[in-house]
Image: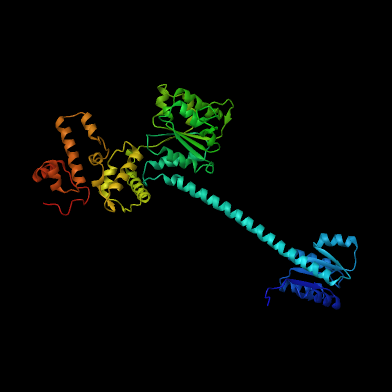
């Protein structure tokens, strides 16, 4: 038995025999509702879901066109058909305009004609509903796609934005980030100065992803150590045939970064020739590919980084003053890691957990003693040196908590102090002062490093250093060397 619900049709006619005839012609294929006037028809529309209306034009009270006009306003999706014994063209035009009539059925009608009209009308109703549903779905999917793209962009901005510049609550980097945030939304060149490895590229990337160009590409290049010829190819690109073995055009970074951001680090190393070429790009936005004669333009935002003080280089005649002022509309100075001692713990933990995840070696963190040694060191290599050291600690770690015994010897030998001066043995060797004091300073560093590396096992330390236990203890008391935390071996022989 077919349990599928039949399409519903409303039949309205004030003549009972006409109403019965219409029902007889359609009831096998449709669920028929009948009414003798517009008021009854309106009541049935309120109570039932109606797909098609067959309505007589000439009825007491409201005419068919008047009734269907009201239906059109309330239920616009219902297909409306007029049955009339008159074919006046003016009436037809008025019906089409006022009531949105789909079809006229003239009297006398044939049952097959009525059945065909009903089938076509219900098909049109279904097609119209499918179209509306698909249009709604397309609008939803379009909105959802736009929302997903925006969410991805937001996640990208958050993942590469200023939240990625890790620092302690009272870090000197806070002022730097505040300044960079201000500059980020202004489409002007930015000069970022700081020692190598201080995170200039990370800061430039964060500025890009919080700027109005965040949905455009970000490119970066370190100019240090590159020849002029290689720099020209990387920046300007090259035409086909300009280089040996080059079968096609090569697109340079100035073109790739169009409408986006290009960060050039190490511009303090640029030759006078490349400084002049860069000046043209900054002032005119124009350049020529290697081997080409046409002039290309780019609307990129240029950020630059310098490892040295460019003002000093301008004063010495090593850097063009006009290029310096063109690049330094906004200036940011990034402090070295030795000036951010409070940040070392935050950075070291983050580097450790990232490395542990990348290498699949679970750890729980660094001990307080290990962090104390790391914070006490100068880090001349800045963030890169810290990352190398923490990765090395992870490689050799046997416990979930990484202790100071794993730290490199030159870091362990760094003496504690607020300013952290003379961190290396080389500084002592080349320094000044009485020989006795310099020798004692080296001896103190060796003692601290050896005991830390051996987890404060004094028996092993005395044996390695060729001292008696009494002699070792005397030296520790003399220099005031004590464990940084509870690192003394519980099995130490006393």
> Horizontally, is 87 left or right of 12 in the view?
right
| Quadrant position of residue 384 | top left
Please state the total of marks drawn on the protein image: 0
Residue 223 in picture, x, y percent from top left: 43, 31
Whether residue 35 is visible to the viewer of this picture, yes or no, is no
Residue 288 located left or right of residue 485: right
Residue 129, image x, y percentages: 70, 63
Tell me where residue 83 appears, x and y as whole percent: 85, 68
Q: Can residue 138 be seen in this view?
A: yes
User: Which is more toward the observer, 199 or 455?
Assistant: 455
> Which residue appears farthest toward the top when viewing the image?
317
Residue 288's place in the image compared with 491, above or below, is above
Name the quadrant containing residue 452: top left
Depth check: give the residue in front, 115 or 336.
115
Q: Position of residue 358 (x, y in %)?
A: 38, 49
Give the quadrant of residue 74: bottom right
215 lies above or below 232: below
The coloring applied to the image is rainbow
Apparent side of residue 16 relative to residue 361 in the rendered image (left or right): right
Which quadrant of the rendered structure holds the N terminus? bottom right
Nearest to the observer: residue 237 or residue 308: 237
């Amino acid at each position: 038995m077919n349990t599928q619900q039949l399409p519903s049709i409303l039949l309205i006619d004030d003549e009972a025999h006409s109403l019965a005839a219409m029902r007889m012609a359609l009831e096998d294929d449709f669920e028929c509702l009948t009414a003798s006037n517009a008021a009854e028809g309106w009541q049935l529309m309120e109570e039932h879901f109606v797909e098609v209306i067959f309505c007589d034009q000439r009825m007491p009270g409201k005419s068919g066109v008047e009734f269907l006009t009201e239906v059109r306003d309330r239920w616009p999706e219902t297909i409306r058909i007029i049955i009339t014994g008159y074919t006046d063209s003016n009436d037809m035009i008025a019906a089409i305009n006022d009531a949105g009539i789909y079809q006229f059925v003239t009297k006398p009608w044939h049952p097959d004609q009525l059945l065909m009209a009903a089938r076509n009308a219900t098909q049109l109703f279904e097609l119209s509903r499918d179209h509306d549903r698909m249009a709604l779905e397309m609008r939803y999917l379009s909105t959802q796609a736009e929302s997903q793209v925006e969410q991805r962009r937001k996640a990208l901005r958050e993942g590469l934005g200023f939240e990625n510049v890790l620092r302690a609550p009272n870090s000197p980097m806070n002022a730097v980030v505040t300044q960079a945030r201000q500059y980020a939304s202004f489409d002007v060149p930015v000069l970022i100065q700081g020692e190598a490895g201080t995170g200039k590229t990370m800061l430039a990337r964060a500025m890009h992803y919080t700027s109005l160009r965040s949905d455009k590409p970000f490119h970066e290049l370190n100019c240090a150590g590159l020849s002029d010829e290689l720099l020209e190819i990387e920046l300007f690109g090259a035409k086909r045939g300009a280089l040996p073995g080059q079968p096609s055009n090569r697109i340079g970074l100035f073109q790739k970064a169009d409408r986006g951001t290009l960060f050039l680090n190490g511009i303090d190393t640029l030759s006078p020739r490349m400084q002049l070429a860069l000046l043209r790009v900054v002032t005119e936005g124009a350049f020529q590919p290697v081997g080409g004669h046409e002039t290309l333009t780019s609307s990129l935002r240029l950020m630059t980084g310098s490892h040295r003080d460019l003002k000093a280089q301008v004063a010495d005649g090593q850097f063009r003053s006009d290029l310096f002022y063109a690049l330094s509309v906004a200036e940011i100075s990034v402090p070295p890691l030795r000036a951010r001692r409070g940040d070392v713990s935050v950075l070291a933990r983050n580097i450790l957990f990232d490395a542990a995840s990348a290498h699949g070696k679970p750890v729980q963190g660094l001990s307080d003693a290990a962090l104390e040694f790391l914070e006490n060191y100068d880090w001349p290599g800045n963030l890169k040196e810290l990352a190398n050291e923490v990765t090395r600690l992870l490689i050799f770690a046997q416990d979930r908590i990484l202790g100071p015994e794993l730290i490199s010897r030159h870091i362990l030998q760094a003496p504690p102090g607020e300013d952290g001066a003379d961190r290396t043995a080389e500084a002592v060797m080349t320094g000044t002062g009485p020989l006795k004091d310099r020798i004692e300073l080296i001896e103190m560093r060796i003692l601290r490093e050896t005991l830390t590396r051996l987890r404060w096992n004094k028996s092993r330390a005395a044996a390695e250093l060729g001292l008696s236990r009494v002699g070792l203890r005397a030296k520790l008391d003399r220099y005031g060397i004590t464990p940084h935390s509870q690192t003394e071996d519980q099995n130490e022989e006393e």
